[in-house]
Amino acid sequence: MRLPLAFLLIACLTPTLSFASANEYLLAVTHDLPADAKAALQQIDGSPRQLLAARGYLRAGQQLQSRWGWSAEEIRTYENSPEHRDLLDEIATVRARFEAANPGYSLYANTTTRSLDLQVQRWNSNRSIGVIADRLVQAVKRELIAYPAHPDAKATLRFADFLRAWRPAPAAAPLAVPGLSLHGRSRAIDFQITQGTRIVAPTEIAKVSTVWRAQGWANRLAAVMRDTRFIGPLQSPNEPWHYEYAPRLRAANAKE
């Protein structure tokens, strides 16, 4: 059976038209983002990863700016603050507990505030982020079939709602969107189990089942976190080493 020439042309051109529309719609839904988020998007490689990041910014909504990672100057200020000393003291308490309960083993905690540049670098190089971003692009192409070729106000709002509602499958993205990582405000700490100079349980997704779960390190770490200012571990994605830090309130910095 021979198909009409017009049908063949539409079939060949549809992917290209859909992708072009996706870029236009990406520009439309990010038009009103804060300058910091727009600048971050410009540093992200390729439209698929940009789309996935834009989804995160849209989902953050009005909290986007308040959740945004610190600048280099803000990081320097924090590192000389009482709040930072509180964090180091809390880590020391947890480490002492862990060493007492697990002779011969200790905890390493990465306390370096994660800069935006590093967050972008990891976003651009992470293979799983690339896979999820490609899945989002395919979903976007299917979604845009019923949209106007060029975004108007109504279609832009509809597309923004679509991005907010879309969920990666089968698992959540392994990284926070650049700018929104709790590590960018020293509100999350990753712990590793060490024995002397050897890392026994590293911060690697591939080691969650075989090391953190099978060898009991996830439960041992969770046990020493009780009654501290650490909350966790992170469940989605499954990171038994990742704990959120809730700083105690101080009169000089009550907004934290």
Image: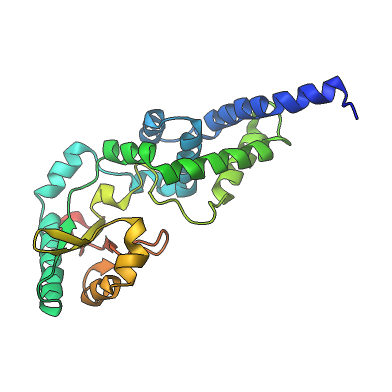
Residue 137 image offset from top left, x and y in percent: 57, 38
User: What residue do we see at 22% from left, 68% from top?
Assistant: 229
Say which quadrant the C terminus sits in: bottom left
Q: Is residue 170 left or right of residue 68?
A: right
Say which quadrant the N terminus sits in: top right
Splitting the image into 4 quarters, where does residue 94 fall?
A: bottom left
Q: Is residue 228 visible?
A: yes
In this rendered view, identify the residue nearer to me: 30 or 251.
30
Residue 100 image offset from top left, x and y in percent: 10, 78
In this rendered view, identify the residue nearer to me: 22 or 131.
131
Splitting the image into 4 quarters, where does residue 90 fall?
A: bottom left
Residue 72 image offset from top left, x and y in percent: 19, 37
Q: Is residue 77 above or below residue 32?
A: below
Furthest residue toward right: 1
User: What residue do we see at 12% from left, 62% from top?
Assistant: 86
User: What residue do we see at 19% from left, 42% from top?
Assistant: 74
Q: Is residue 234 above or below residue 151?
A: below
Q: Is residue 147 above or below residue 171?
A: above
Colour scheme used in the picture? rainbow
Q: Is residue 168 above or below residue 37?
A: below
User: What residue do we see at 40% from left, 64% from top?
Assistant: 235
Q: Is residue 243 left or right of residue 125?
A: left
Residue 91 image offset from top left, x and y in percent: 14, 64
Instruction: Count the labels in the image.
Output: 0
In this rendered view, identify the residue nearer to me: 201 or 225.
201
Q: Is residue 84 left or right of residue 29?
A: left
Q: Is residue 245 left or right of residue 132?
A: left
Q: Is residue 31 visible?
A: no
